[in-house]
Amino acid sequence: MMTDIHQYLAELDDIPGTRVYTAARARKGYHLNQFCMSLMKPENRARWKADEAAYLADWPLTDDQRAAVLARDYNRLLDLGGNIYFLAKVFSTDGLSFVQAVSTMTGMSVADYQAMMLAGGRSPQGVRSIREGN
Amino acid sequence: MARITNGLATSHVPAIGVAMDLGKTDEPYWQPLFAGYDWTRQWLAQTKPDVIILVYNDHASAFDMKIIPTFAIGCGERFKPADEGWGPRPVPDVIGHPELAWHIAQSLILDEFDMTIINEMDVDHGLTVPLSACFGALPEWPAKVIPLAVNVVTYPPPTGNRCWALGEAIARAVASFPEDLNVQVWGTGGMSHQIQGPRAGLINREWDNRFLDGMVGDSDHLRRIPHIEYLRETGSEGIEMVMWLIMRGALGPATRALHRHYHVPASNTAVGHIILEPVT
Ligand SMILES: [Fe+2]
């Protein structure tokens, strides 16, 4: 059976605190994500660490994207089309683990976030749907 | 003839690989997780699969945003562990089975699954962590591996129903390969996890365990779980569980479970693991 694409996409935007990596986000973030990908190469990582702003100047990013990368504002980067697996190249180059970087998006300290995970994680109760509030 | 003897599913959390590579598996944080793989290591040593068709997803390692294949099959001779930004994992190269892989690729295309064929690529934690968890740290992997990469990053990923049907087609392709081979299909990724946004850290133990229950016996209802349910109930990265349905589809109408394990957390993730046998 064929899924209605408009309904499908509308539902993806109905999850609290979540930016699903849709085609629209992928288009907006294309160069941002490709910039992140360039940090897979050690020689690029060295150049990036030496002068982040100069390195970014080689990539056709928007001013907002540039500012959010320099500020390591990961929630903002998700809004600007970044995908977490690509953004991971930036925080890995910073020496951060997934837990350390991911916790910055939740408004919790790393210690509080880790304690939440050890206690079984965040409950889905109340954060399934914006519309339904469940 | 080649035959699919078993299916196996496991999460592929990168931190599991890091814990093994750094010798931390006996630490209190990791010990209960690895305990769930002890049975598996003994069982694999006894059952000795010749080839593993390993369903996984690439996490911006071999594929960037330039090309996004929905279903891709690795037909090369060998695949190196990817450098994911902190150097490649110190694990053996993955040895392919080009003859069976090309046979499956050709059969699938004639069976109306339009596969992308990969001759050269590096494989990331999505593929190497399941091998490490299930076999342990070894100087070489005891089975040939055919990587089967699924896009679950850029939306939409394939539907659960399509994944199941691909599994069925893989089973038909394997059954027509003339050499006598013991083939397993592994589905990897999941279980509940979300690693982005303010909702990060979501875990749904009840949903995950219902999904594990559903893998056993007649699993037909799992084909109809829509993407939005995985996302709402198990976190944005819980969508990886559609890949388990390729494995389940390959096993036929009914299964029995040989082993099952569930543990929270590994880093941001709920770890699930199950070994299945087709019931004929
Ligand atoms: Fe994954």
Image: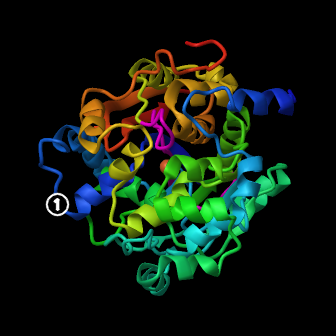
User: What amino acid is found at the position of numbered circle 1 in the picture?
Assistant: Gly
Which residue is label 1 attached to? B23
In the picture, which quadrant includes the N terminus of chain A? top right
Query: Vertically, is B159 above or below B96?
Result: above
Residue A107 shown in magenta: no
Residue drawn at 55 percent across, 81 percent down = A55
Q: Which residues are magenta?
A: B176-200
Density class for disc 1 (Cα within 10 Å; few <14, some 14-19, many ≥20) is few
Q: Position of residue A99 (x, y in %)?
A: 34, 48
Q: Position of residue B122 (x, y in %)?
A: 52, 72
* Quadrant of the image occupied by residue A30: bottom right
A130 displayed left or right of B6: right
Residue drawn at 12 percent across, 49 percent down = B26
Chain letter for mark 1, please. Answer: B
Residue drawn at 59 percent across, 31 percent down = B231
| Residue reaching furthest to the left | B27
Residue B195 shown in magenta: yes
In the image shown, does A115 or B191 lie closer to the viewer? A115
In the image shown, does B161 or A27 lie closer to the viewer? A27
Q: Secondary structure at mark 1?
A: loop
> Is residue B56 in view?
no
In the image shown, does B247 or A114 lie closer to the viewer? A114
Helix, strand or loop: magenta stretch: loop
Residue drawn at 46 percent across, 87 percent down = A43
In the picture, which quadrant includes the C terminus of chain A? top right
Query: Vertically, is B78 above or below A6?
Result: below
